[in-house]
Image (tube, coloured by chain):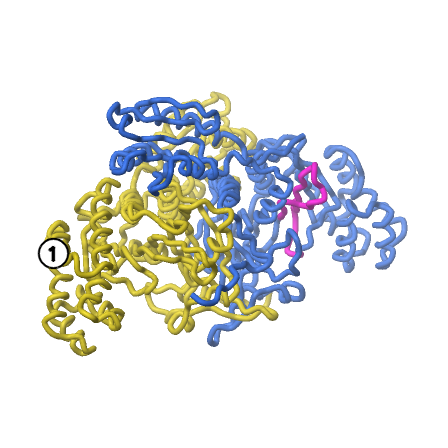
Chain colours: A blue, B yellow
Amino acid sequence: MSTIITPRTLSGFMELAPQEQVLFEHIKNVLESTYKSFGFFPIDTPVLEYSEILLAKAGGETEKQIYRFNKGDTDLTMRFDLTVPLAKYVAKNQGEISFPFRRYQIGKVYRGERAQKGRFREFYQADIDIIGDGELSIINDAEMPSIIYNVFNKLGIEDFTFRINNRKILYGLFEMYDYSDKVTDILRVIDKFDKIGLENVLKELEEIGVGGDAVADIVSLLTMQGTDKEKLAALKAHVGKNELFDTGVEELTQVLYYIGRFGVPAKNYKIDLTIARGLDYYTGTVYETTINKHPEIGSVCSGGRYDNLAAYYTKKQLPGVGMSIGLTRLFYILNEYKYINEKLKSPIDVLLIPMTDDMSKAVETAAVIRSSGINIQTYLEDKKFKQKLAYANKLSIPYCIFIGESEIESNLLTVKDMNTGEQQSLTVEECISTIKNGIDEINSEKCVIIPE
Amino acid sequence: MSTIITPRTLSGFMELAPQEQVLFEHIKNVLESTYKSFGFFPIDTPVLEYSEILLAKAGGETEKQIYRFNKGDTDLTMRFDLTVPLAKYVAKNQGEISFPFRRYQIGKVYRGERAQKGRFREFYQADIDIIGDGELSIINDAEMPSIIYNVFNKLGIEDFTFRINNRKILYGLFEMYDYSDKVTDILRVIDKFDKIGLENVLKELEEIGVGGDAVADIVSLLTMQGTDKEKLAALKAHVGKNELFDTGVEELTQVLYYIGRFGVPAKNYKIDLTIARGLDYYTGTVYETTINKHPEIGSVCSGGRYDNLAAYYTKKQLPGVGMSIGLTRLFYILNEYKYINEKLKSPIDVLLIPMTDDMSKAVETAAVIRSSGINIQTYLEDKKFKQKLAYANKLSIPYCIFIGESEIESNLLTVKDMNTGEQQSLTVEECISTIKNGIDEINSEKCVIIPE
């Protein structure tokens, strides 16, 4: 070969080294198994769709960021989220779907954002949604965060807070004061409360022509400090003036009532009346999730309730509620902070090292050990013993088994625990149970360790 | 919403209904867990790459079929296989990789083939490769089919045959007879032996100017019937005339010696000297895999040995051996033949049906059952009892649990086995063990059932 092309990956496209990939897979598996444990169906939609389908709603910013091209006469777009494909999927398969339809999807999406550290153009989203046919109980809105609570807890992320609001409360409140036409602008400003503080919020509101005592009253209600109970009481004081507001308060009360029963501890959730979420399809409950030690990261899992998922594709009314984890970004952040548990980086439990020229006995023994559920590689190359051990060390493989003439004769295996250095002569059965215990201990470790 | 866009998916892009997707996931999981059990690392490369990278080698047919486009100034291509991205990955990460590098990748690839039943434009490949640094033992070539044997066996596909050859034998043989310059054409013809028979092979060879007694001798050697032992003996009769041929025979002998030791029964493999595999990067062992009942499907898992994986991206010599399952096509075929085990189509083990207005007890009980490893959905909608049961039936959920006033009072759960219709009053612990036994039984079933 005369010319060498420098091997490189597109900027903004995460490509992990082998051992990092193993850690990523561990995290992905926790999400998937937890979603499944709550009775969600997997779905898998194409990466490419007709542009007409994916862009039915989009416009402005979204259009600029998409990967869109023609192949022959077909105008194609790479999916930029998993929600639009879900809407299409449900509309298309409505005859075969039983509602409420609980689905998860973990897949790559594409956005041509400006390249920047920690910003990805190809990234995994891990979504759960529950779609109803015509109606969907508000109790689902309380179950959603409990699923994510289980995910984070199993990962090892414990000190985080769901911030919960209901957009009906916000819309209703502004209707009460005749600000309906400016709601989007107002919400955008209030959403910044955490970053810029009360004074600046009021100033910015005044700049967009929303000022005076009434607004100050609303803002101080939305930004009030206190327990959830106190916040609900303050909201209830305004009940009776606006139907939308009243419904919002009732829904929020219900969500708060059930979320604890779904097993989320009180320390992990709170009402935050300032969050609104940018996407305008949310119509009720909205969520954000903050890792308390790292508010600068922003929300690591967001979502909410929407009245009608698939209005562009069907006349059927399909309300839903969903939450989404930006998996690639979450992994990137946890990795940057060195919070990921390195002990889990080997996919291989045992390296079996043959010490004889004929590897028959080694190969046959590996098959027996493997059939007990242990991940085992037989080292087949003709290298020095030292190099074979170095290979096991470099891959962080926790156990080695040696099979030489004496092992074949005695029918015992030499097993080395690579962490302690301890070496034992064991029968195959003893060997399997020793290794299984060790592996179980490693696998009981959580993926993420965030120091206090 | 005024206009409705008909929800549709691009032709050649598989999008499964929820319960079919569950079956697909079962099959995918068997592949993945088996690959892992042999000590393979997962890797995940981008769907999009620089065209320069992916098309370093391609030309002709490949170029025509690819999805290639510009985004800004960047010339992009969607990956059309997982081998070229692997070559780039290994060249790029060679400093971090320990060799031999065993990796699997199950991912979507894109080819703009003519739309046709059973042909896909977006499809999963499920690849395993072992890459050596400078050299790689021939024993790996015997281990490869044993991994696929394990995959097929766990799936429930038992009556299949690996057909194994070594291209060095073919090249060497034609070198012996001074046909080196026509080898590619000759192999293409011989590859058709199964379809067109001996006579037509000889006729076509004559048409491309390869005729005479010598060729007839070669062809009759390559197409001889008999046991592997007889075939090896016939080959060995020609040893000593051509170095490449001799190496090929020696390699094939080694592969045959070890494949049985790796646990592949004799009925599942045989030498087939007519297979050559189209791709010209194979340099030694080549494999095809036929489901014996369905030769018309062609090979369901193919691969081989290559001398130098990443010659376009690095000067490092990286020999390897790999096999690939076309997962989307395999699923499509098994589904068409109705070979997929329908019993596995529910991802949900239990539907818990609350019979009281307040669902607190139901929700709390579901959490306890879930924590024992059972996938459980709580039915949260306000529907009639009959509708709730119909939902469980439509989703093929094997168990229902009812919690009403009397269950709350007695602290017993009513459990219904949806297959037998049997209903029992059980404590939570009894309930968990009953359901776990039932679920284990279902999950011990194989994904694929091919009747005799």
Residue A35, visible in the rendered structure: no
Quarter placement of the C terminus of chain A:
top right
Instruction: Give, as a single range, the part of the protein colored magenta.
Output: A280-304
Q: Nearer the viewer, residue A330 or B312?
A: B312
* Vertical comparison of A427 with A160: above or below: above
Residue toward you, B452 or B106: B106
Relative side of B437 to B368, left or right: left
Q: Position of residue A366 (x, y in %)?
A: 31, 35
A400 lies left or right of A281: left
* Relative depth, front residue between A106 and B335: A106
Q: Quadrant of residue B266?
A: top left
A297 magenta-colored: yes
Q: Please name the residue shown 20% across and 67% down the image.
A: B174
Check disc 1 and report its element: helix, strand or loop: loop
**Which residue, as the protein is rendered here, is positioned at the far right?**
A212
Q: Residues within 10 Å of mark 1 (few under 14, many from 20)?
A: few
Q: Quickly name the residue at label 1.
A: B237
| Residue type, label 1 | Ala
